[in-house]
């Protein structure tokens, strides 16, 4: 499955248009994937002193914390 931020937004929009409780739950999940993709993208772009293999192993809460500390 493609987890680029743009694809996640497209899927979320489609699911929101469906409007069922189940589709809205999955839309929220797609939006979370989008936020994670943006976080990792920003972290990789702004934290040049951090090796990519370390960034790849981080879990989302740790990545957000590192990004906030860096900014």
Image (cartoon, helix red, strand yellow):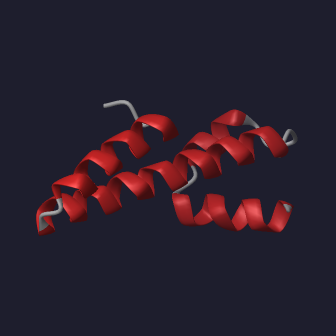
- Whether residue 38 sits left or right of residue 1 in the image: it is right
Position of 22 compared to 26: left or right?
Answer: left
Q: Give percent across and percent down for residue 25.
A: 23, 65
- Residue at left offset 23%, top offset 54%: 17
x 78%, y 39%: residue: 45
Q: Nearer the viewer, residue 14 or 51?
A: 14
How many marks are shown on the rendered structure?
A: 0
The quarter of the picture where the C terminus appears is: bottom right
- Res. 66 in view: yes
The answer to whether one can see residue 4 in this image is no
What is the x, y in percent for residue 18?
16, 54
Q: Residue at x 43, y 58 (%)?
A: 32
Which is more toward the observer, 14 or 66?
14
Left or right side of 20 for 65? right
Question: In the displayed structure, would residue 7 be above or below residue 13?
Answer: above
Q: Quadrant of the N terminus?
A: top left
Where residue 55 sits in the image (x, y, percent)?
65, 44
Q: Taking 34 as reference, is 10 left or right?
A: left
Q: Nearer the viewer, residue 11 or 4?
A: 11
Q: In the rendering, at what x and y percent does residue 68 appear?
A: 76, 67
Residue drawn 13% across the image and 69% down it? 21
State whether residue 20 is above or below residue 56: below
Task: Check the image and name the residue furthest to the top.
Answer: 2
């Amino acid at each position: 499955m493609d987890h680029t931020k743009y694809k996640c937004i497209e899927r979320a929009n489609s699911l929101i248009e469906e409007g069922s409780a189940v589709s809205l739950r999955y839309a929220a999940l797609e939006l979370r994937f989008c936020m994670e993709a943006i976080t990792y993208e920003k972290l990789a772009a702004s934290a040049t002193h951090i090796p990519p293999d370390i960034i790849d192993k981080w879990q989302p809460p740790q990545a957000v914390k590192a990004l906030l500390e860096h900014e």
